[in-house]
Image (cartoon, helix red, strand yellow):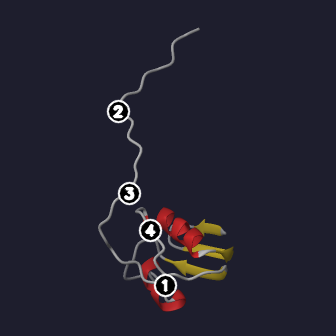
Amino acid sequence: MSTNSNGSRVAMKASKMSMADVAAALRRQAGRPVEDHTGLKGDFDFQIEWSPEETPDSTNPSLFTVLKEQLGLKLRAAKGTTEMLVIDQIARPSDN
């Protein structure tokens, strides 16, 4: 998978990706957890382009629009539990 961005457009090209891998890639783009609940098996190839921020003068649609219209996927907000690493203290290493 490759992802390129020029600030006003993001392009993602994927080859032989499982839906779990697609969810992981979307997690990075969406900035929040994404889980695969499609039940789809196998590997998929696709290429999509979207605008990172939907603006009236943008020629590219939002990520949510592209996923729904071009791939038939829908990101749906839901509440759930997730594992998280919490660092509650940090100190500089001592000199040896």
Please state the horizontal and vertical placement of residue 85, each as a whole percent of the image.
42, 44
| Residue under numbered circle 3 | 82
Task: Provide residue 30's location: percent of width, then percent of height.
Answer: 44, 67
Say what secondary structure mark 4 lies in.
Answer: loop
Identify the secondary structure beneath mark 2: loop
Q: Earlier in the sequence, mark 2 or mark 4?
A: 4
Under mark 1, the amino acid is: Val
C-alpha span from label 2 to label 1: 39 Å
Q: Which residue is mark 2?
A: 88
- Name the residue that disc number 4 marks: 34
Q: Is residue 72 above or below residue 76?
A: below
The tag earlier along the polypeptide, 4 or 1, is 4
Q: Is residue 76 left or right of residue 10?
A: left
Q: Which residue, as the protein is rendered here, is positioned at the far top?
A: 96
Mark in the foreground, 4 or 1 = 4
Residue drawn at point x = 50 percent, y = 62 percent:
28
Mark 3 crowd level (few <14, some 14–19, many ≥20, 10 Å Cα): few
Does residue 59 appear anywhere in the picture? no
Q: Which residue is mark 1?
A: 66
Residue 58 on image: x %, y %: 44, 81
* Residue type at tag 4: Val
Spot occupied by residue 74 in the image (x, y as percentages of width and height):
42, 83
